[in-house]
Image (cartoon, rainbow, N blue to C red):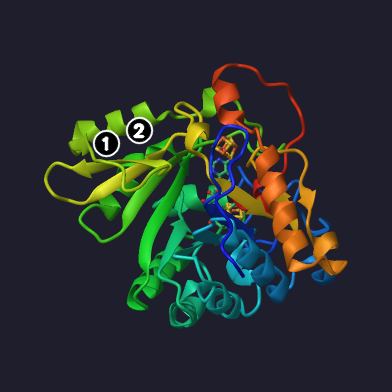
Amino acid sequence: MQQNSPVKDQFGRVLKDLRISVIDKCNLRCTYCMPKEIFGEDYVFLPEEELLRFEEITRLARSFASLGVEKIRITGGEPLMRRDLDQLIAELINIPGIKDIALTTNGILLPKKAKKLKEAGLKRVNISLDAIEDDVFKQINGKGVVTLPVLKGIQAAQAAGLQVKINMVVKKGMNESQILPMARHFKNTDVILRFIEFMDVGNHNGWDLNNVISKQQIIDRINAEMPIEAAEENYYGEVASRYRYKDGGGEIGVISSVTDSFCGTCTRIRLSADGKLYTCLFASEGFDIRSKIRNHISDEELTDALSKLWGRRNDRYSDERSEKKHNNRRKIEMSYIGG
Ligand code: SAM
Ligand code: SF4
Ligand code: SF4
């Protein structure tokens, strides 16, 4: 497929990253993401035939790559619950223009799958872990799972040669007690720990600004015990602010989409498991691309549709939140779109 000129949205932002949710199911029920009271036994997940097939995902990714996408992140639900995910990764990695593929997972299935993923060409994984103490983690994940399976997942990923970052969502009253224990646990290891401010995604997690522990509060707490200093950005639009331990014990990151929003450099588009495209994590409406590709749209028409969608984009939800411009519209769920 030929390379088109990079597309720009209404604010001149280029399209660089594609996040693909491959499944809406998950083996955990984190209270802030898929609370078990709502995602219970009788919750109806997407049926198999509604999920995009691998060849459909690959076709879309190829079209996106021709418009300038260079990075792909696979997410979910829990992406490792999608059968044969390694085959999809092997296909995506071969697309001309795609320079980087990453995966976000809760890590529980990594002992079974890390080796195959690495063989398929995956280089790095982000593993979500919100606490290092079992009692706290069991409460958060809604399934009473202890940390050991996740820690084994981290080990398996490292043993397979995958680079590992840990994502920890910090929410007041849930796990702020874990900020220092988590930092201590991952200091002086190859693993970079990234703290994420609790966001107002979805409609079910009872978000309230009072429950957000800010980036500043997180770094102050760590700095008081383990001195850190700001480190430079790795690349344009990097979402995490980086800090390094002054004693050489490695680095941490903080993702502050609430207190320090970064819409101005947002180059991301999201594809849901059932083939809807979202130009913002906080969107209400998706663009149904599955029906178009199942109705035999040509490659040119597909690229044109994607290009026009990005060209119309004017999302800047987090910036507007800071400007207090929001109404209480319905938003897509994080477990559906994958972060
Ligand atoms: N199941 C996988 C996992 O947990 O890594 C992938 C999907 S999960 C939705 C992706 C990331 O979104 C996780 O790191 C999770 O902690 C984060 N997340 C979910 N809800 C969030 C919220 N309200 N605020 C901030 N991060 C959130
Ligand atoms: Fe599942 Fe990830 Fe959401 Fe937790 S954060 S419920 S592991 S999708
Ligand atoms: Fe991008 Fe929307 Fe997040 Fe802003 S709020 S950084 S536009 S996904």
Q: Residue furthest top?
A: 324
* Residue annotated with mark 1: 222
SS assignment at label 2: helix
- Residue drawn 57% across the image and 17% down it: 323
Where is residue 24 shown, x and y percent of the image? Answer: 71, 59
Residue 284, relative to residue 93: is it above or below? above
- Residue drawn 53% across the image and 79% down it: 90
Describe residue 77's horizontal placement relative to residue 220 as left or right: right
Q: Quadrant of ligand 3?
A: top right
* Residue annotated with mark 2: 218
Choose between 81 and 49: the one closer to the eye. 49
User: Crowdedness of circle 2 by 10 Å Cα count: few (<14), some, many (20+)?
Assistant: some
User: Crowdedness of circle 1 by 10 Å Cα count: few (<14), some, many (20+)?
Assistant: some
Q: Distance between the Cα atoms at labels 1 and 2?
A: 6 Å
Where is residue 71 shown, x and y percent of the image? Answer: 49, 59
The answer to which image quadrant residue 119 occupies is: bottom left
- Report the amino acid beneath label 1: Ile
- Residue drawn 49% across the image and 82% down it: 116
Q: Pointers 1 and 2 in contact (CB under 8 A)?
A: yes
Where is residue 225 shown, x and y percent of the image? Answer: 20, 35
Q: Residue furthest left?
A: 247
Describe residue 96's horizontal placement relative to residue 194 as left or right: right
Choose between 6 and 205: the one closer to the eye. 6
Q: Is mark 1 within 8 Å of ligand 1?
A: no
Q: Which quadrant of the figure contains the N terminus?
A: bottom right
Residue 232, relative to residue 220: is it above or below? below
- Report the amino acid beneath label 2: Ile
